[in-house]
């Protein structure tokens, strides 16, 4: 969960930084146009003063603004992405629950890997995450295989024999 919050903060910072730079670039362009018009309307006899002022107050900010816009265009797709895909977790959850229902709540990483497109490592990581969240209990079979028991998954008979409250 902490990793998700960190990612959220990084994504928000990335978007805020982009919005700030875009606003700064637009303001610089407006500043450049305004000063260019003011300098053209000014009746200065000194050509060198005119060139220096146009360069400092109009062309230089315009160049910086164009550089910022080009930078934003290049870094458009550098938004931090999550390390896992929530859709993938949703699919994994469906597979794990389907297997657990068919096997009285007992699941191994091999069961998941055999009945889905997920690898053993992905299955083990997901089952460990379920265990850490309290949705599964870890058991060890006689041969040393990890068996995860999902106590909240009940068979039809268990549901049928449940006591009324």
Image (cartoon, grey):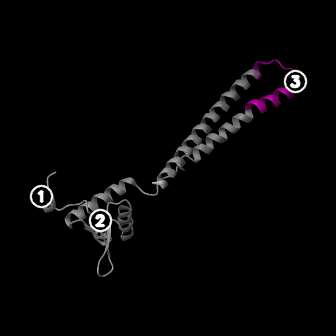
Mark 1 lies on residue:
160
Q: Is mark 3 on a helix, strand or loop?
A: loop
The outermost residue toward the front is 165
Cα distance between the residues tagged 1 and 2: 30 Å
* Residue under the image location 21 percent in, 62 percent down: 101
**Camera-nearest residue between 56 and 40:** 56
Q: Which residue is located at x 79 percent, y 18 percent? A: 42
The numbered mark at residue 139 is none
Residue that badge 2 annotates: 116
Image coordinates for residue 119, horizontal then vertical, percent: 36, 68
Q: Name the residue under label 3.
A: 46
**For marks 1 and 2 on the same chain, the one whose residue lies earlier in the sequence:** 2
Q: What element carries label 1?
A: helix
Over which residues does the magenta segment extend?
39-58
Pick the quarter of the image with the N terminus.
Answer: bottom left
In the picture shown, does residue 121 fall above or below 94? below
Q: x%, y% of residue 142?
A: 29, 81
User: Marks 1 and 2: CB-CB under 8 Å?
Assistant: no
Q: Secondary structure beneath disc 2?
A: loop
Pick whichever, 4 or 80, lies toward us.
Answer: 4
Q: Is residue 125 magenta?
A: no
Main SS of residues in magenta: helix
- Side (left or right) of 26 relative to 93: right
129 relative position to 158: left or right: right
In this view, 48 is above or below 164: above
Disc on the earlier residue, 1 or 3? 3
Numbered disc in front, either 3 or 2: 2
How far apart are the two marked residues, 3 and 2, measured between alpha carbons?
79 Å
Q: Which residue is drawn at 30% across and 67% down?
A: 112
Q: How many labels does the image show?
A: 3
Q: Which of marks 1 and 3 is in front?
A: 1
């Amino acid at each position: 969960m902490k990793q998700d919050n960190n990612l959220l903060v990084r994504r928000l910072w990335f978007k805020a930084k982009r919005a700030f730079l875009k606003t700064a670039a637009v303001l610089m362009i407006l500043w450049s146009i305004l000063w260019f018009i003011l300098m053209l309307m000014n009746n200065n006899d000194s050509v060198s003063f005119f060139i220096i002022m146009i360069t400092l107050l109009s062309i230089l900010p315009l160049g910086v603004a164009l550089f910022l816009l080009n930078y934003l265009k290049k870094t458009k797709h550098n938004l931090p992405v999550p390390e896992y895909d929530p859709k993938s977790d949703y699919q994994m959850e469906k597979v794990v629950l389907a297997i657990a229902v068919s096997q009285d709540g007992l699941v191994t990483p091999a069961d998941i890997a055999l009945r889905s497109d997920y690898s053993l490592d992905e299955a083990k990581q997901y089952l460990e995450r379920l265990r850490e969240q309290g949705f599964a209990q870890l058991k060890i079979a006689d041969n040393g295989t990890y068996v995860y028991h999902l106590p909240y998954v009940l068979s039809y008979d268990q549901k049928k024999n449940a006591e009324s409250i």
